[in-house]
Image (cartoon, grey):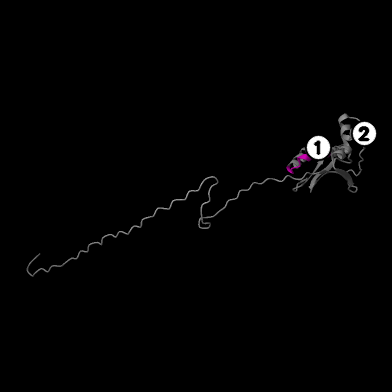
Amino acid sequence: MISEPSRYYAVELQALPSRIGQIRRIVSAHLRHWQLDALIDHAVLGVTELLTNVHRHAQPDKRCTVEIELLLDRLTVSVRDHDPRIPEAVRCQDPLDAYDTGDGCEELATSGRGLAIVGAVSESWGVRPCGADGKVVWFTLAAPPPAVPVETRSRIAYGSAAEVPLRGYAPFPGVPLSTPAEPAAVPVLEPVLAPAPAVVVATAHRVPAGRAG
């Protein structure tokens, strides 16, 4: 089951090695989409350790739910399983160095890099019981302020000469403005009247009686 509101993501899975690698990629993709690239390494490391603990120690099964949530300036990553036993992290001087050198911390040897690593890379972490149905192990990371996008806008002015009449010329910097020439006068032509058509009047001639034509 997967749900994904804008700044919240949750996925239910079996904490198996093949699925842990997939969850690492999914968490990385979401943080990159949320523009939290600076938190990817620590978030992925922490969620890997929590899932490894579920895979190695949780009883009676390996079902769990991974949640990541960004609230204001805090990213919270949590893993809920169905084992009500509360884990305890074994303290060591420097868990990151202990993992790199392979020395010093029993918890690192028996439980992945352990909760000591989660505490070392996170701002805070903790465990809360969920009744008899399991527990939630969580950690938080401080989110950097979001970058303000630079938006470029273009403005276009609409209008016509009738709406904004041109009242004069302004000189271009460094170039003298010459006086525009007066417009040439347009001659006014008198209308030419066509001659009236000739009127032909037919005159009837009376023919005397007895003469034809």
Residue 107 location in percent, x, y? 91, 35
- The local secondary structure at tag 1 comes to helix
- Nearest the camera: 122 or 113? 122
* Label ID, residue 177: none
Specify whether residue 119 is painted magenta: no
Estimate how packed mark 2 is, as few (under 14), some (14 to 19) or many (20 or more) residues with alpha carbons within 10 Å: some
In depth, the one of 190 and 157 nearer the eye is 190
Instruction: Please give the residue where the numbered disc 2 appears in the rendered image.
Output: 106
Residue 72 in the image, given as x and y percentages of width and height: 79, 49
Amino acid type assigned to the residue bearing label 1 in the image = Ile
* Quarter assignment of residue 36: top right
Amino acid type, residue under disc 2 in the picture: Glu
Which residue was labeled with disc 1?
A: 20
> In the shown orientation, is residue 131 left or right of residue 25?
right
Q: Main secondary structure of the magenta part?
A: helix
Front residue of 73 and 51: 73
Residue 90 image offset from top left, x and y in percent: 93, 37
Disc 1 versus disc 2: nearer the observer: 2
**Seen in the image, is 49 located left or right of residue 181?**
right
Compared to residue 126, the image places residue 168 above or below, namely: below
So how many labels did they put on this image?
Answer: 2
Give whichever of 81, 90 is nearer the camera: 90
The disc, 1 or 2, on the residue closer to the chain's N-terminal end is 1
Instruction: Name the residue at the bottom extreme.
Output: 209
Instruction: Please report the bounds of the magenta region as a residue range.
Output: 33-46
